[in-house]
Image (cartoon, grey):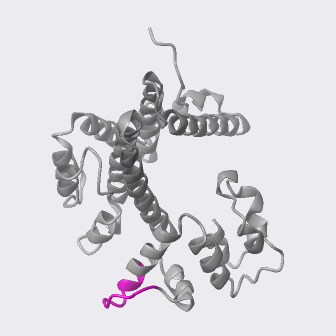
Amino acid sequence: MIIQGVLNNKAPIELQEKVHPLGVFEGMKVIMSETFDVQGGFDDVYRIFLVDTPIGPYFEEYLRDADREKDEMSRAGVETSQVSGILTKQDLEIMKATLKKAWLEDFNEFCQGLGGTTAEVMGHMLKMEADFRVLLVTLNALNTNMSTESKLQDRNALYPSFGYLYPEGTKELRKVWNDTTVRAALEPYTKYLSLFDQVKQFYEAETSVTEGGKSVGQFQSIEDLIYAENVHMYEMAFEQQYHFGVFYAWVKLKEQEIRNVRWIANMVILGTKEHIDDTIVPIFQARL
């Protein structure tokens, strides 16, 4: 969010209310000050926000990879003066996906190092999250230039290097470019194939609506389906004892609760209460 503000010459202090509380750190006082120079601010952003925080190593790796696209010679690091030029040429959504991938891989390695039940429970949740990210990236890239032959490498670079799909499933998905090839790659994975078929119905119904067809209310997008699958997965983390995975699961369920509240509020504001149940994901439903 802060990088987007700097790129748009918007003072970071104007974004202060939108910053997630868990992402606040000491160095933000400099960036959020009224005297912060937006025009020449990348030096401070790079030094404080990207290096002196836990995401620093991930961002350093991202900047090196991005810079390598225009210079194939390996670099020891990225000069501060280069940061502005690199960031202004990169898609921020791709940047966030790249950082998320690096964080997932690092976090999974850390959890496996803990051993015991924590490694088992967290390993399952993180593998599922990695697989869902592969599906999300693949399906959202369909019918865009990210599925063209020249851009497949950029798309594939966003796939985490672990998970239940890795390596065989991921290897096949790296080759896909349309609905047919995606379905063929997912055939050995019944659960994910079912998700794909449901998503396909959603987008086909969405196309039908634009042509005067029926509503898409009975179908869900890939994001909605993943949220529902994740909730069930996080709930199951509480079935085992003596592990740290329950804390991660609790935070993730709380995030879904917040999404539910926001959706309800938006539907009330728009006067479309009948659509509230379309996207709500119930948490800890009664089990019969």
**Residue drawn 54% across and 84% down?**
83
**Left or right: where 113 falls relative to 156:** right
Residue 259 visible within the image: yes
In x, y percent, where is residue 133?
38, 51
In x, y percent, where is residue 157?
32, 66
- Quarter of the C terminus within the rendering: top left
Is 189 a magenta residue? no
**Residue drawn 41% across and 62% down?**
102
- Quarter of the N terminus within the rendering: bottom right
In x, y percent, where is residue 79?
51, 89
**Residue drawn 38% across and 78% down?**
65
**Left or right: where 279 falls relative to 182:** right
Q: Is residue 281 above or below residue 130?
A: above
Residue found farthest to the top: 288
Question: Most prominent secondary structure in the magenta stretch?
Answer: loop
- Region in magenta: 66-77
In-front residue for pair 195/49: 49
**Residue drawn 37% across and 48% down?**
113
**Left or right: where 145 falls relative to 170:** right
In-front residue for pair 219/114: 114
